[in-house]
Amino acid sequence: MSMDLEKLHDMLRKTQEPKGYFFSKDKSRVMELLEGLVKNKERYGYMACPCRLASGNREKDRDILCPCIYREPDVAEFGSCYCNLYVSKDWNEGKIPEVYVPERRPVEKMF
Amino acid sequence: MKDGMDKAPEVILYSLSTCGHCKSTKRLLGACSVEYRFTDVDLLDQEERVLILEELRALNPRCSFPTIVINDKVIVGYREEEIREALGL
C-alpha cells in the first residue's frame, strides 16, 4: 500500500508540477490525502476529492475528480486547493499567508 | 477553562473518513482531551446520509466538512484558533 502511494505521489508530481501545481511541503498531509484518493478509487471507481462527499455517480462528481475544477481558481486566489494537496510555489515557500481555503463548490452539486 | 464553563462542552463533529482537515480536527480534539461525537458521513448508507445531510445543511448551508458544533457555536473547517476558543482553551 505505502509503495503504491509513493508511486502515485511520484507520478502525480511529475505531471502536475510542470502545470504549476506543487504538492504541499507537508508530506505527511499529502500522503494522507493520497490515501484518501486511493480509498475513493476503491469505493467509487474514480478518484473523487477526499475532502468532499462523493455521490458514487461519476457524472455527478465530474467537478470533484481530483484535480478538481476548483483547484485552478483556488490556487490562483489562495495559493492552495481546498484540501491543501496542491499548492503554488509561493505557498510552499511561505511567501503568502496560509489561509483556510473556503469551499467553492456550489452546494446544489451535492443534492 | 474560562469562567462559566464549568460543564464539559458538548462537541459534535460532522466529518469524512478521507478528509485531511477532518483528520486534523479529530487529532486536535484528541490532543485537547475533549470528548466528542463524530459521524463520518461518507461511511453511512444512502438513507442515513440523506438524514444527516439535512441536519448538517441547517447548521452549515454549504454542507462542507468538517463542521464542528461546540455547544451552540458552529465552526466550518479546521480553524484551530476558533475551535480552541470555543472550547474555552
Image (spheres, coloured by chain):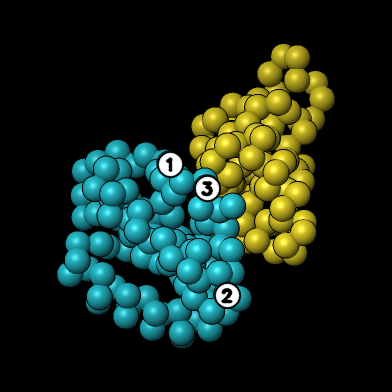
Chain colours: A cyan, B yellow
- Residue sitting at x 77%, y 33%: B10
> Disc 3 vs disc 1: Cβ atoms closer than 8 Å?
no
The crowding category of the residue bearing disc 2, from other C-alpha atoms within 10 Å (few below 14, some 14 to 19, many at least 20), is some
Q: Is residue A33 visible?
A: no
- Residue sitting at x 44%, y 61%: A64
Question: Which mark is in front, 1 or 2?
Answer: 2
Question: Which mark is in front, 3 or 1?
Answer: 3
Residue tagged by mark 3?
A: A108
Q: Secondary structure at mark 2?
A: helix
Mark 1 or mark 2: whose residue is earlier in sequence: 2
The chain ID associated with circle 1 is A
Residue tagged by mark 1?
A: A102
Q: What is the three-letter code of the residue carrying label 3?
A: Glu
Q: What is the three-letter code of the residue carrying label 2?
A: Tyr
Residue tagged by mark 2?
A: A44
In x, y percent, where is residue B83? 59, 34
The crowding category of the residue bearing disc 3, from other C-alpha atoms within 10 Å (few below 14, some 14 to 19, many at least 20), is few
Q: Is residue B46 visible?
A: yes
Q: Secondary structure at mark 3?
A: helix
Q: Nearer the viewer, residue B73 or A108?
A: A108
The chain ID associated with circle 2 is A
Q: Nearer the viewer, residue A63 or A84?
A: A63
Q: Nearer the viewer, residue A63 or A100?
A: A63
* Residue at mark 1 to residue at mark 2: CA–CA distance: 25 Å
